[in-house]
Image: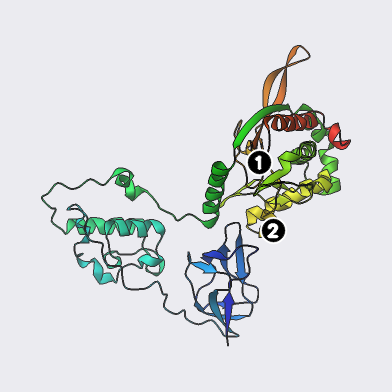
Amino acid sequence: MAVEIKVPALGESVTEATVSKWLVKSGDQVAVDQPLCELETDKVTVEVNATVAGAIADLAVEEGATVQVGGLLCHIEAGAAGAAPKPAAAAAPPKPAAPAAAPAASLTAPAPVLAATGGANLAASGPAARKLADEKGVPGSAIQPSGKDGRATKSDVLAAISSIGAGTAAPAAKPAVPAGPRLRADREERVKMTRLRRTIANRLKEAQNTAAMLTTFNEVDMTNVMALRERTKDDFEKKHGARLGFMSFFVKACIAGLKDLPAVNAEIEGDDLVYKNYYDIGVAVGTPNGLVVPVLRDADELSFGGIEKGIAELGRKARDGKLTIADLTGGTFTISNGGVYGSLMSTPILNPPQSGILGMHKIQQRPMVVGGEIKVRPMMYLALSYDHRIIDGREAVLFLVKVKECLEDPERLLLNL
């Protein structure tokens, strides 16, 4: 009996996803709970698992297709042994050559002997090869593929272009010159933006277009935090099973600032200002697929150990692609640490609908005047980007001053001062 595998519910307000990768093919034998494919939503990538054991009867959609929640992904023949895969839908007749736009585009002329090989499966080939073949009007039948299952590489397409050009008389007219950057098309690769990257782009542009965004700066002397961390890091790790980093100090310091300046923890909703008396802190994490901001819930109720363990777990899930929609929604304030990449100064952009984001930066030894003497101190620049529609300049500056005071005198955090 064929069992339908459908797109599962993906979270509140998420209605569609993209099939980013198939992990199986037609005829493959699968076990219960074996991952079948990866679906990419606006926020996370999720795996769809087999609900029964059996053989993959067919794949209903191709990689890159957009699917709706509840839509069909594939069929599994329950209990069946693996069979030879059905012919792929991609093996359709080759796309006809595009008409020449100018005398120079002579590549659409009939190819010589190359078509006798059966040609390449362009639909299953890489994006660079497909793009180059489409731009030059080279049909799959004119390409001798070197890849697996008849797939063409960019080198195969270039070889076909050379062969076609050699077998065709050059036109007498002066060739037209392609416009701008397409002159180097043979050394470019065009890849479709992922859903996550499109969402990041849209949200950041939305923040620029909607919020009255400003950034204010301060600097903090990290001497005392670094000394406290050095004295206690071994005992801390033994007790809590997590490394004592700087992020827990910053989370605690920001919460102290948010309690003193509630507007920094607020957001605009229609004509209302919503002041939040809870502190869900987003921590920006860079992943191979883009920037994500998982949220540490009720961070004000967590100890230093709880914060460090929570951040470590969110970071692990982000790197493994295991974050859920719930992990990424509902934050009230965000902290971004560009210092881990060596950034000395930046202006972080807001994470809508939040009204504030703190940027941490690289700790750098600098000469400072302390008690009338010049001393070398480990200094860090802090940047607070804020929505001026909600937060006045005075509040933004006082927030940063509060964060600075807590970090330069970390005992204040322990005493809740």
Looking at the picture, how far across and down is residue 260, in whole percent?
A: 80, 36
What is the quadrant of the C terminus in the image?
top right
Left or right of residue 75: residue 279: right
For residue 324, say whether it is visible. no
- Give me the residue at 69% from left, 27% from top: 219
Q: Amino acid at mark 2?
A: Ala
Furthest toward the bottom, the residue is 1
Q: Amino acid at mark 1?
A: Ser
- Give me the residue at 28% from left, 65% from top: 139
For disc 1, the neighbor class at 10 Å (few under 14, some 14 to 19, many from 20) is: many
In front of the other: 143 or 359: 359
Looking at the picture, how far across and down is residue 12, in whole percent?
A: 65, 63
Residue 326: numbered disc: 2
Residue 336: numbered disc: 1
For residue 218, say whether it is visible. yes
SS for dot 2: helix
Q: Is residue 345 above or below residue 111?
A: above
